[in-house]
Amino acid sequence: MCAYSVFNTFPVYPLSAKPLILLAFCRYRYHTSLFNRPGWQQVMELMENGQVETLIVKDMSRLGREYLQVGQYTELIFPSYGVRFIAVNDGVDSLYESTNDFTPFRNLMNEFYAKDCSKKGRSVVRLKAETGARVSSRPRYGYMKDPADPKRHMVPDPETAPVVRYIFDLCVSGKGPAQIAKQLKKDKIPTPGYSYYQKHGVELTGVDITQPYNWSTNTVAGILEDETYLGHTINLKSTTLSFKNKKRIERPESEQLRFENTHEALVTQQTWEIVQDIRKHKRRRANMAEQNIFSGLVYCLDCGGTMVLHRAHTMDAVKNNFMCSTYKKKGKDICSAHYIREQELNAILLDDIRRVTHFARQNELRFAEHIRKKQGKEAQQEIAMLQKKIDTMQKRQAELTKLFKRLYEDSVLGRIPDEQYRILSQEYTTEQKEIQEQLPAMEVRLQELKDSSSNIARFIENAKRYSEIPELTAEILRIFIKRVEVGERAEKYSRTAPQEVRIYYRDIGLVDELPENVADSLKEEIPNEVA
């Protein structure tokens, strides 16, 4: 009989004899609370082939620290394969039944030890996370460890940071995650997993190094939604179910720790906002040569529903048109068609963007003053309205907490029937959930209104950057336009009747009329290129 030690490597042994397995604690990547470690898998393979007669460990903890599984192996699996099990320090020998009396208690204590180690490890990670330091072992794709402070700080990686910016630029230009992944593969840009393998020689779990350019849609979507690239650190975003079950689960935002401006951003705030706005209006790829560049931007002026673009291979492009989705789904009793052709809307938006951006470039101070004056009254009214709603919601949220407590006490003391408790509890829960969903969006909008001055400056900078706009593109639309509302024609079925189109610009809102003397000069400077 030959000895066979299970470490990271395995010596050759004679196949004619059953080996004696000396199982040692493998300190490579797997903890003994798990039974998926490579060495153990090879031991089980030997057992299944009938090549093991005796299994010896130093003590029971070297076999494993999960007492249910350890018990299953020692009580059921080993005997079924005819394997003798010996734990030297614990005096356990399956050949002698009397030595196994206290084995279950030892296994339970071993699990308690593993659980305690896990608890202490989590505490250390949380303490570090609360300081705003990076707690992940690897920096995000696009970054690398800061040579001056490798454990806590990261800096842009000169090789992969441009790729991250490229991905965001592609999204701003109108491409979705699937199209971006296809473009990256076409450009032969290595995936994050393969890039890490190239630099460190380590194969990450789930990474196929035989396909270095095979970007997935999920990988691209994850990058587009990661606030790390905005310069922020979000700690404790996920955790595991337990020290036994390593499945990752996302934590609710209320349990995450957020620290802003902890490292250099790879994308600007404006680019981030545009991309997130695009991601809110996810759509399936249309079976057409070109994607709808207006997706998620055009709405019905009356009902607020989205406007749907109708086009087909059998229809001339000039006939492509938008129609109210509410009208399409619920009929004319709820809303009307609000019909407008795509070509006509394109011309209206292109002409107005040229008008407003030209004014912003040529008359910066007057433009800022005009927008600020125009927004002043409207913004103050909206700020007051939002503040009032937020205060009311927060007050109601506090009241609901007290009501829940009082309702629970009444139920426990038998003051109200169980059925009434269930109905009221459900109503309060629904109301509380609605408040929790609406409140963050209102607070964000309130902050946007308060930051209107910096938003005007940003709009002027974009107007300077895009001094020439020969045609309307997805990028131009996303940078300048926040929302477009299309009204119904004054006379139904008339092609010449007036139709209101409200254009809300990003950062500055609705720009209806410019100062009269400047508007007159613009008529002379800007040719009427689009009918």
Image: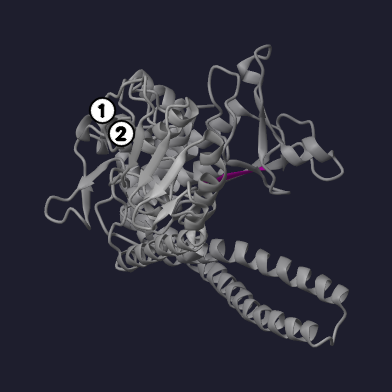
Name the residue carrying label 1.
Answer: 11
Q: From the top left corner, tell me how far across and down residue 244 is, in percent.
A: 48, 53
- The question of residue 68 being in magenta is answered with no
Return the residue nearer the eye: 398 or 518: 398
Q: Residue at x 35, y 37 (%)?
A: 21
> Is residue 487 depicted above or below 238 in this figure?
above
Q: Quadrant of residue 384?
A: bottom right
Q: From the top left corner, tell me how far across and down residue 466 is, in percent.
A: 33, 37
> Is residue 424 depicted above or below 507 in this figure?
below
Q: Amino acid at mark 1?
A: Pro
Return the residue nearer the eye: 470 or 29: 29
Name the residue carrying label 2.
Answer: 4
Q: Which mark is residue 127?
A: none
* Quarter of the picture holding the N terminus: top left
- Taking 25 as reference, is 50 left or right? right
Q: Amino acid at mark 2?
A: Tyr
Q: Which element type, helix, strand or loop, lies under badge 1?
A: loop
Return the residue nearer the eye: 40 or 260: 40
* Quarter of the picture holding the C terminus: top right
Q: Which element type, helix, strand or loop, lies under badge 2?
A: strand
Q: Residue at x 77, y 84 (%)?
A: 412
- Taking 403 as reference, is 25 left or right? left
- Would you say the residues marked 2 and 1 are in contact, meaning their CB atoms lie under 8 Å apart? yes
